[in-house]
Image: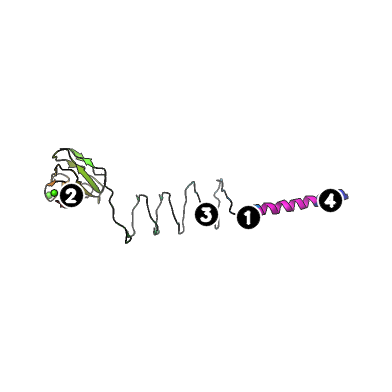
Amino acid sequence: MSKERVKLAVVGLVLFVVLTLAALALFSAGPGLVQVQPQGAATTFTDLAITNNASVGGDLTVTGGATAASFTGDVTGDLTGDVTGDLTGDVAGDLTGALVLGADDFVTLTPGTSITVTNGAAFTPTATYQPLVAAAEVTPTITAGATAGRLVALTNTGTDVINLADSGTLKLSAAAALGQYDVLVLVSDGTNWIEISRSDN
Ligand SMILES: [Ca+2]
Ligand SMILES: [Ca+2]
């Protein structure tokens, strides 16, 4: 090999080493952005620690314990661990653990949309705290067949009397005549609405 070729080979080798070191320095410098592109087959990480935000576009499956300072997305699977932070969304699944309220928390029933009841017509409660109103004294009926165990507190917020007959699938201690602010509390057995209590306020 000629001297010139040896020189070129040495220069090439030095350039290769310098570029490799530069690339390593670039990728090890933080913080950076690491993107994981979808692959045909699942990629398995033995350990993956993320110290900043992580955005997951697809499903997130956690088989171990999960601790999150904040979790703002929906949880559609089962949640078997404790929730120690605030839960601001709806819980549509079953709660099989204890429901523990903090020392500064209340059970708060968001009122359902007020229903204007009419004579002889059935109305369907939409919330446990169900305000009712009428345009004149009326005797409506209540739709049967609600989910068993559902509670409803019918509250007449208007000045016109709302009568509820003790008949059919409405099982009362006696007919109810709800004046303003009077309340009738019922529970459904899946077919009937059964009176728990009433209050003439
Ligand atoms: Ca009765
Ligand atoms: Ca009253």
Disc on res. 28: 1
Query: How many other residues sit within 10 Å of disc 4, few (<14), some (14-19) or many (≥20)?
Result: few
Mark 2 highlights which residue? 184
Nearer-the-camera pick, 2 or 129: 129
Measure how far apart labels 2 and 3 are at the Cα level. Answer: 52 Å
Observer-nearest of 53 and 13: 53
- Label 2 crowd bin: few (<14), some (14–19), many (20+), radius 10 Å: many
Question: Of tags 4 and 3, which is closer to the observer?
Answer: 3
* Mark 3 surroundings: few (<14), some (14-19) or many (≥20) residues within 10 A: few
- On residue 52, the disc is 3
From the viewer's perspective, is residue 61 above or below residue 132? below
Q: Position of residue 94 (x, y in %)?
A: 33, 53
Residue 157, quarter of picture: top left
SS type, badge 1: helix
Q: Position of residue 135 (x, y in %)?
A: 17, 38
Q: Is residue 69 left or right of residue 130?
A: right
What kind of residue is marked 2? Leu
Q: Earlier in the sequence, mark 1 or mark 4?
A: 4
Residue type, label 1:
Ser
